[in-house]
Image (cartoon, coloured by chain):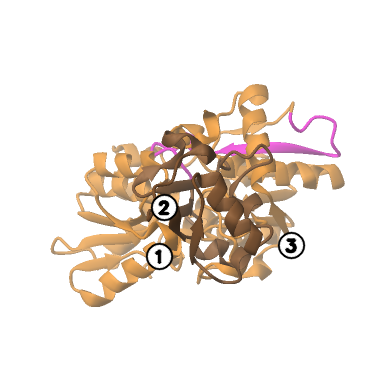
Amino acid sequence: MPQLSVALVRDRVRGTILERIGDTPLVPLKRVAAGLRGEVWAKLESANPGGSVKDRPGLWMVIDAEESGRLVGGRLVLDATSGNTGVALAMVCAVRRHPLELCMPDKVSLERKRIARAFGAQVVLTDPLAGTDGAIREAQRRAAADPERYVYVDQYANPANRLAHELGTGPEIWAQTGGRVTHFVAGVGTSGTVMGVSAALRPKGVRIVAVQPNDALHGIEGWKHLPTAIRPPLWDERAADEHRVMGTDEAIAMTKRLAREEGIFSGVSGGAAVAAAIAVAREEAGRIVVLIADGGERYLSTPLWE
Amino acid sequence: MSVTVRLPGALGAATGGETKLSASGATLADVIADIERRHPGFASRVLDEHGAIRAYVNVYIGDEDARARGGAGAKVPDGSEIMVIPAMAGGR
């Protein structure tokens, strides 16, 4: 892997929309987290130009593939995604002029498929009953069948995913809190966020709290129920000091409160992460930073906001 | 009415590992109740406490979203295939 750095990545995309990835706002949750031992601050990743936290790994994985010399001769960028990574990769590939193919489970929320296509990506729909794991297997099959044609970025195993958070998200949080952050709370999907922020902030004494759904059938988009899913190669549970689980109903209730009480229109995973952060803040004092991965607009076709 | 119900692996634990079941009923709610008799606890995974399809579950009767056909009360034609899938998927 080439030596990626914030300066190098910024330099490669200077003067484009991709330069606006990162440096997202950090805001205190003064109502939903009022009266607790700890204070809760939310990192709003919907402020990225592609609308989610996935802009960070999307950008870093593509620049990494370019720097390593793999992305030559019109080779197709390939990945499996249920959405946000697809949108991020599609935006990055549009700017960097790479063709892109995405394997996505059929019949999951429509918006991201349409947005990815709007950026020019080819979308391959996979068996809806097999979920994201089915999309991963299809991407693996395609990459293995035609390795010359594809650059399979594989967000679940790509160290550039983790590095985007280790050198980007983590240091941003440290700077934005003036070094006063005590806890970091985030959900586990690819685990890139938790792994990267842990690498950046744990050595500074920050407690890392990793959250996953409490059930295999859940509605927390982007999160993985690790006991029943393909284990992300990036994941190492030792990177977290604490592991918590969250139910979908509690996540949905908090997602609705975030909109009505804090003016934050979040995806369900944001509600799930905030509910977990509030549970931490009930028990422990400190400045707890929680990552809200995307905005609610991405879910308007689901029954959630009916 | 006799129908085939296909489930994601994530729901297999609720049906003893079966992800393709035969069931009967005139409506989607009847079909779910039929499976519930054989696999107690199944219905609550798909329907909420009011008997409506859970917000994070999609049910397709053939190619059509059951919500567009009346939700749990949707009629199920004889021989149709019903698919229960998570509305959202893990790992972005």
Earlier along the polypeptide chain: callout 3 or callout 2? 2
Three-letter code for the amino acid on which mark 1 is drawn: Gly
In this rendering, the answer to whether B22 lies above or below A19 is below
Marks 3 & 1, CB-CB < 8 Å contact: no
Q: Is residue A282 rendered to the left or right of residue A246?
A: right
Chain B on-screen colour: brown
- Helix, strand or loop at disc 2? loop
Which of discs 3 and 2 lies nearer the camera? The answer is 2
Chain A on-screen colour: orange
Residue A45 is one of the magenta-drawn residues? yes
Please tell me the numbered disc located at residue A82. 2
**At which x and y percent is residue A253?**
67, 35
Q: Is residue A72 rendered to the left or right of residue A303?
A: left
Q: In this figure, which residue is indicated by the disc labeled 3?
A: A241
Earlier along the polypeptide chain: callout 3 or callout 1? 1
- Circle 2 residues within 10 Å: few <14, some 14–19, many ≥20: many
Residue shown at 50% from the left, 44% from the top:
B27
Q: For the magenta stretch, what is the residue range?
A: A32-53
Three-letter code for the amino acid on which mark 3 is drawn: Asp
